[in-house]
């Protein structure tokens, strides 16, 4: 069977033809680890995880790399505002991110490289770009000269004016072109810094993905994934950096053959933002719904479409999963068929997923099987086996679902926890630290961990 992928570089659906069918290589831009992941971050992880799982039904060797950004302006800001060490922040949120994604059924990438472990590779890459005249040094900064790369702007299809407006970088007078972007910059006092030919400093954000994808996968690789918001400038800049190492007329597909971008997530019709206060953190949703419910909700719309997140979708998915569970409990499979993947009914389900991950269609096929089960249209064993196999490909774990749904916190318990946190806050304000500590210990016994952040106290279910 053939997989079809919508390539967001050429903006058309294409037959997936791997560079080497014995070695499929995929890269995704991972999280910047300075705070809790929101549902938009989770969507990228879940749909990319599904892409990897689906390709694994066709190819035996699929390697998936997704990086961790552990040095960045936002991390430095978080360190200054909280008074915590950078490494303490990044290690903590790296672990939280991996745990949350595990709850959502996301397999850990085969390699999860950290930016700070690849500073030398980045320096070497920047040195080559300067030697090749694609980058220039000014005032201890190294900048990429976008006028030197023939295909700059081809991924996002932006005009020069849109590129300048969208790059959100200050137009400093040392830049040759306003769209030129930073490869290396001097660190301010108290900021992390590394030795380089251009002085003590730190890398810009974009260069890390060029360096880590080259090191962990080699270029060109098959598919580059990420949220659509990264298309410009981040992905445009990755292409410019990696291709310019080969030559200024090197075609973008010498970096990644296909580009896979997932759509935005809005909340009740609005963009998620701090000022509106509608950012949906995975951590908070997991208190009320299981990871399977969140995963199914995210897969209920096509990955390329914008998705409007709401409790309604979660409740619908919860009902669907309960129905899956009940059916499978009532109908155990006695005899399994080893050729289930080749079964014609299964092909219908797989064809939907092989058509650029058409999950709404795949879920409709799955739902149709429940109808057939009721009407006894097909042998019981076969249909239950089909359902089980399909659920497995989607990465839903029904065994876990049963345990999890008992762990999820109900509204009453949530109110009790929040009241206790409020009492602890008051005790702390009154400098009654003994009482504050007692409340924290009590919460710990209830399996609730608390985390005092600059945005107030958060709580996490410790499982
Ligand atoms: Zn990246």
Image: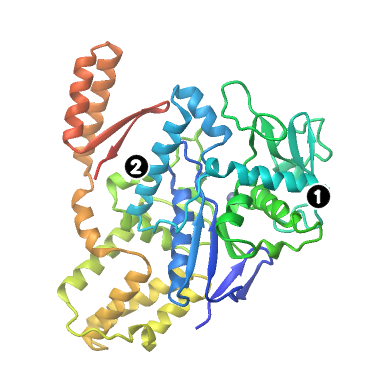
Whether residue 36 can be seen here = no
Q: Residue 91's spot in the image, x, y percent?
A: 42, 38
Q: Quadrant of residue 381?
A: bottom left
- Measure the alpha-carbon separation of dots 2 and 1: 49 Å
Q: Quadrant of residue 104?
A: bottom left
Q: Vertically, is 14 above or below 274?
A: below
Task: Tell me, yes or no, whether the two marked residues, 2 and 1, touch with CB atoms within 8 Å.
Answer: no
Q: Residue 284 — which label?
A: 2
Secondary structure at badge 1 equals: loop
Q: Vertically, is 418 above or below 426?
A: below
Q: Residue at x 44, y 57 (%)?
A: 109
Q: Residue 291's spot in the image, x, y percent?
A: 32, 54
User: Which residue matches tag 1?
Assistant: 132
Instruction: Characterize the local packing of mark 2: few (<14), some (14-19) or many (20 or more) Cα atoms within 10 angstroms.
Output: some
Q: Residue at x 35, y 43 (%)?
A: 283
Instruction: Characterize the local packing of mark 1: few (<14), some (14-19) or many (20 or more) Cα atoms within 10 angstroms.
Output: some
Whether residue 462 can be seen here = yes
């Amino acid at each position: 069977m053939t997989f079809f992928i919508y390539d967001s570089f050429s903006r058309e659906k294409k037959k997936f033809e791997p560079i080497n069918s014995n070695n499929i290589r995929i890269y995704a831009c991972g999280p910047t680890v300075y705070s809790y992941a929101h549902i938009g971050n989770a969507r990228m992880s879940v749909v990319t995880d599904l892409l990897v799982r689906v390709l694994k039904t066709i190819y035996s060797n699929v390697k998936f790399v997704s990086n961790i950004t552990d040095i960045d302006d936002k991390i430095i800001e978080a360190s200054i505002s909280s008074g915590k060490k950078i490494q303490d922040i990044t290690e903590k949120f790296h672990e939280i991110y991996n745990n949350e994604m595990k709850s959502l059924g996301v397999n850990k990438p085969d390699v999860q490289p950290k930016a700070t472990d690849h500073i030398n590779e980045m320096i070497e890459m920047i040195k080559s770009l300067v030697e090749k005249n694609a980058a220039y040094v000014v005032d201890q900064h190294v900048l990429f000269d976008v006028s030197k790369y023939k295909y700059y702007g081809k991924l996002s299809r932006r005009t020069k004016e849109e590129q300048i407006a969208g790059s959100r970088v200050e137009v400093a007078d040392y830049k040759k072109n306003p769209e030129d972007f930073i490869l290396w910059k001097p660190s301010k006092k108290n900021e992390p810094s590394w030795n380089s030919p251009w002085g003590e400093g730190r890398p810009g954000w974009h260069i890390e993905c060029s360096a880590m994808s080259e090191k962990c996968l080699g270029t060109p690789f098959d598919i580059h994934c990420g949220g659509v918001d990264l298309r410009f400038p981040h992905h445009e800049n990755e292409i410019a950096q990696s291709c310019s190492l080969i030559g200024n007329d090197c075609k973008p597909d010498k970096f990644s053959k296909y580009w896979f971008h997932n759509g935005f997530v809005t909340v009740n019709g609005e963009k998620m933002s701090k000022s509106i206060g509608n950012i949906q953190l995975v951590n908070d949703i997991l208190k009320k719904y299981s990871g399977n419910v969140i995963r199914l909700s995210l897969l209920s719309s096509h990955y390329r479409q914008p998705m409007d997140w709401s409790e309604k979708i979660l409740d619908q998915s919860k009902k669907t999963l309960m129905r899956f569970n009940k059916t499978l409990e009532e109908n155990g499979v006695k005899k399994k068929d080893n050729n289930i993947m080749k079964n014609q009914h299964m092909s219908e389900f797989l064809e939907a997923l092989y058509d650029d991950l058409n999950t709404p269609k795949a879920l409709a096929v799955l739902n149709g099987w429940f109808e057939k089960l009721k009407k006894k249209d097909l042998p019981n064993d076969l249909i239950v086996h089909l359902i089980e196999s399909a659920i497995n490909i989607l990465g839903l774990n029904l065994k876990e679902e049963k345990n999890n749904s008992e762990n999820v916190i109900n509204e009453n318990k949530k109110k009790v926890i929040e009241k206790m946190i409020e009492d602890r806050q008051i005790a702390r304000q009154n400098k009654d630290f003994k009482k504050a500590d007692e409340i924290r210990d009590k919460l710990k016994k209830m399996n609730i961990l608390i985390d005092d952040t600059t945005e107030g106290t958060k709580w996490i279910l410790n499982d």
